């Protein structure tokens, strides 16, 4: 069984930042990433990144190139296409899709995943959750689209798509917006956006290359069906915590941490979006948390060495 001092799960900006700090502080680490490339959600940011000082990046992929070219990343042990299946909090064994490790410390930086709508699980008209309503909006020009959700991301998507689509339906499960006022203003008065309050999708049927959505609604006058070409769910995200049974969570499966980024197991840390919740997701916070967690691990190792002398 391979022994790992610090095992980092996740190759996005939080995991890569943690690997850089491990190298700087002289800690041995292994970074595993479940996909075939590093960078995580940065690959799906198509707009300018202006809030990650001191530079401005034209898109997420540009920042990824800078990160993976970092000399400390070049020196790290990185394994792609590997994901954690389970952890044993007593023996500190971590079982992955490819191996079993005995680790001193585990740092979880697995990010978030998009919430799905069960009634649309097999619907071919559902767009990828990574669909960019800026860079890819031209692909739905002149079509009818349903955006599902009432938060910031849903209204941002609706506003962007209204510039290209023929009709945008916004299906909101509740009776009011979760989105901030500035996003509400952006869609107010747009003639090709129709908001359907207290409405959910109950079923779907494909007819002549279009999708008929059956709706249930508490509002009188709302249609029972709408016909669309595409569907874009924007119903929030959840922490990617599969395989981490026994760790405390809050909200939509986000890992609960203390001020040092430790979870309820003293040898396990969580950083980035998987521990922040959607409201506090940011690149700068993820990087700062990675630094804090690795520094705390380094101090723990130093203290353990001092006590054993």
Image (cartoon, rainbow, N blue to C red):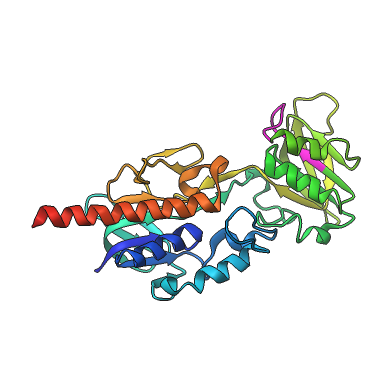
User: In this orientation, which residue lies closer to the viewer: 5 or 121?
Assistant: 5
- Quarter occupied by the N terminus: bottom left
Residue at screen point 38% across, 61% down: 8
Residue at screen point 53% across, 45% down: 238
- Quarter occupied by the C terminus: bottom left
What is the span of residues highlighted in magenta in the rendered image? 169-179
Based on the displayed image, in which of its 4 quarters is residue 59 positioned? bottom right
What is the x, y in percent for residue 222?
A: 83, 30
Report the side of 104 relative to 167 (left or right): left
What is the x, y in percent for residue 103?
A: 27, 60
Report the side of 188 relative to 22 (left or right): right
What is the x, y in percent for residue 285?
A: 50, 49
What is the x, y in percent for residue 196?
A: 79, 33
Q: Is residue 104 magenta?
A: no
Residue 188 shows up from this direction: yes
Residue at screen point 72% across, 57% down: 132
User: In this orientation, which residue lies closer to the viewer: 163 or 69?
Assistant: 69
């Amino acid at each position: 069984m391979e022994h790992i001092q610090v095992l980092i799960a996740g190759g996005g900006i939080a995991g890569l930042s943690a690997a850089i700090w491990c190298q700087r502080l002289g800690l041995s680490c292994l970074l595993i990433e479940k996909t075939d490339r590093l960078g995580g959600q940065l690959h799906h940011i198509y707009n300018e990144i202006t809030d990650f000082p001191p530079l401005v990046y034209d898109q997420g992929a540009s920042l990824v190139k800078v990160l993976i070219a970092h000399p400390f990343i070049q020196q790290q042990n990185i394994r792609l296409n590997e994901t954690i299946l389970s952890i044993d909090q007593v023996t500190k064994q971590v079982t992955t899709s490819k191996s079993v490790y005995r680790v001193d410390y585990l740092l979880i930086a697995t990010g978030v995943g998009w919430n799905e709508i069960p009634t649309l699980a097999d619907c071919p008209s559902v767009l990828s959750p990574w669909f960019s309503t800026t860079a890819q909006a031209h692909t739905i020009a002149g079509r009818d689209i349903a955006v599902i959700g009432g938060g910031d991301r849903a209204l941002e998507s609706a506003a962007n798509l209204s510039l290209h689509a023929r009709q945008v339906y916004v299906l909101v499960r509740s009776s009011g917006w979760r989105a901030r006022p500035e996003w509400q203003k952006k869609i107010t008065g747009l003639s090709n956006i129709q908001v359907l309050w207290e409405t959910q999708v109950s079923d779907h049927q494909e007819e002549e290359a279009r999708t008929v959505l059956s709706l249930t609604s508490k509002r009188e006058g709302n249609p029972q069906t709408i016909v669309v070409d595409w569907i874009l769910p924007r119903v929030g995200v959840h922490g990617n915590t599969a395989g981490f049974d026994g760790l405390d969570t809050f909200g939509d499966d986000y890992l609960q941490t203390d001020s040092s980024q430790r979870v309820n197991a003293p040898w396990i840390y969580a950083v980035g979006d998987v521990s922040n919740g959607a409201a506090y997701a940011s690149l700068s916070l993820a990087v700062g948390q990675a630094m804090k967690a690795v520094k705390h691990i380094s101090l723990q190792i130093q203290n353990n060495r001092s006590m054993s002398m």
